[in-house]
Image (cartoon, rainbow, N blue to C red):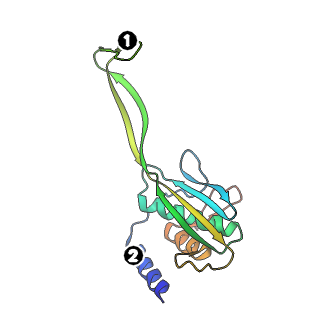
Amino acid sequence: MKVTLISVLALGLAGCATVPSDVYYGPLVDDVGYSALNTGPNEWSVRYTGDTHMTGSTVRDLTLLACADLAAGSGCGWFVVNEKVDESGSILHGTSFSGPAREQTSTGYSGGVDKLSGTMSSETSFISQYRYEIRCYREQPADPGAFESARVASELRAKYGISGLNTTGSQVPKE
């Protein structure tokens, strides 16, 4: 009863959200997508890195979807998230120098003067990245926080318009 009520509330709230139509879901390509590392028997570390336009909630959902797909692909109908880690942050895209030349005296062991051809500027952007440590189960575990792989995958694929993955692992557009 409790799980059903929570599911109904979650679906109701999800219906109110604006879902981006250009969400990439697939293996890591050009620093966007999911990756997984087997850390033990039926245990995985799953990471999803979003692009600069994805919100944190979208990236969390896609991380959970990757967990569900991994569990199902391993023949497990259930999984438990043991740890959630927010690895989001800013990334540096480049550094350039412009403006008048300036000199800076080094205070390090080597001493001397460093000459720069101007002031430094850099472009940064914020990316969302989450890592979930999961354990997969063939049968429903006693843990009340366990997720049913097929149900999670179905709900999140519907929410983001993702119908499935083809054999190369790239996204198949929803018809």
How many labels, in total?
2
Q: Residue at x 62, y 67 (%)?
A: 135
Q: Classify 10 Å Cα crowding around label 2: few (below 14), some (14-19), many (20 and above).
A: few
Q: What residue did someone put label 1 on?
A: 111
Label 1 vs label 2: CA separation? 61 Å
Q: Residue at x 47, y 62 (%)?
A: 60
> Which residue type does callout 2 highlight?
Leu
Q: Residue at x 36, y 22 (%)?
A: 97
Q: Residue at x 29, y 19 (%)?
A: 99
- Element type at marker 1? loop
> Which residue type does callout 1 highlight?
Gly
Identify the image quadrant of the C terminus: bottom right
In front: label 1 or label 2: 1
Labelled disc at residue 13: 2
Could you tell me if residue 21 is visible in this image?
Answer: no
Is residue 120 found left or right of 136 in the rendered image?
A: left
